[in-house]
Amino acid sequence: MGDTESSELQRSRLGFETRAIHDGQAPDAVTGAVVPPISLSTTFAQDAVGRPRSYEYARSGNPTRTALETCVASLEDARHGLAFASGLAAEDAILRLVPPGKRVLIGLDAYGGTYRLITAVWAPERQTAWTAIDLTDPARLAEEWPDDTALVWMETPSNPLLTCIDIEALADVAHARSAVLVVDNTFATPYLQRPLSHGADIVVHSATKYLGGHSDVIGGVLTVDDDELAERLAYLQNAAGAVPGPFDCYLVLRGAKTLAVRMDRHCENARAVVDLLVRHPAVDRVMYPQLPDHPGHAAAAKQMLDFGGMVSFTLADGPERAIQVAERTELFTLAESLGAVESLIEHPGVMTHASVAGSPLEVPANLLRLSVGLESAPDLVADLEQALS
Ligand SMILES: *Cc1c(COP(=O)(O)O)cnc(C)c1O
């Protein structure tokens, strides 16, 4: 587990960009290697029976994973970080905290795979009860609160509708009722938003997205402050074993070093794209948290440094037009996933969110989602303009 305590003093003094490059990544004590070596050994020599040094067996922990876990914990202002083989593996570990028969609340917009994990795996196999409910109105939620709720699962901004939820307000409601609040921070990244500092108990990421940032690694990370919760989750990480390999840890760690500069440009390019979309006659509604008429604008402005690189929009002419536009872009690659250097376009109803069809989380059929990448903004705008024409 990434134990960050030794760097606590440092963390309180150094900026985000500095910590992204240095935390967990001091030059190798023996060789001076500036980049943390990819430590492939699955087992580690012990000094005596029952007297291991720092590591025993690589599922329980290895130096490359520790480097990543320490770095991400630092970036989330968390005491502990744990890395997993995928975002969903991290989510699965968190859901193991819910006692059988107890309830999970999930918002009305979320990653389709999360919804599937809760409703199609945990519900039938572990009798996990669940309710899809509007999490954007804490006062109403407090009134409608199901008594058997153990955990609240929120995304802000959410995938794919960019719904934004006031983390602090939701944490107050959840904690007054002894529920754990989980925030999926994949869209915002720790550079733009640090949910633990707003009262969340657990922050989870698909590291496959912005943390890795280059569409070349599947990974997950979670961070927590509470020592006891961290101990339980670290136990589950090792006992269930959905851990990332050292090379994957290295790739995410390398991506994280440039997270701040990438996010600044993702936000800037997203604004250029939004400027086009809001004035284009083929577009019906643009979802981007910076827009003053976005329902979550106030929450986003309160808790985010900037508004991110994800943009969704609906087409005035309906679903056929949406599919046509998605197939006509040239720079925006038609593909699932998000958060990397290259721009992507997708149709959530058919692609990433097919698993929520017919559910309370169903997305509009005329919806398109953009992951705005780091290409030249005028090129991206021109590409969308030709696809929409
Ligand atoms: C992709 C994604 C996940 C799942 O992560 P994987 O790394 O694909 O397992 C979870 N939450 C959000 C918001 C995502 O976009």
Image (tube, grey):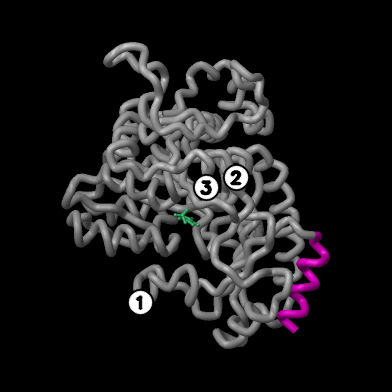
Query: Would you identify the image quadrant in which residue 255 lies?
Result: top right
Count residues near mark 3 (Cα–Cα under 10 Å), then give few for <14, some for 14-19, many for 20+: many
Front: mark 2 or 1: 1
Please determine whether, in this image, residue 278 is positioned above or below residue 56. Answer: below
Separation of residues labelled 3 and 1 (CA atoms):
29 Å
Which residue is identified by label 1? 358
On screen, residue 153 versus residue 385, left or right, reads left
Which residue is identified by label 2? 304
- The rendered magenta stretch, by its main secondary structure, is classed as helix
Residue 92: x %, y % from top left: 33, 49
Amino acid marked by disc 2: Met
Amino acid marked by disc 1: Gly
Amino acid marked by disc 3: Ala
Which residue is identified by label 3? 207
Residue 204: x %, y % from top left: 45, 45
- The residue located at (32%, 14%) in the rendering is 51
Please determine whether, in this image, residue 110 is positioned above or below residue 31. Answer: below
Residue 201: x %, y % from top left: 39, 37
Residue 328: x %, y % from top left: 69, 81
Query: Would you identify the image quadrant in which residue 244 lies?
Result: top left
User: Does residue 203 appear in the picture of this structure?
Assistant: no
Separation of residues labelled 2 and 1 (CA atoms):
32 Å
Give the extent of the magenta segment. Answer: 376-389
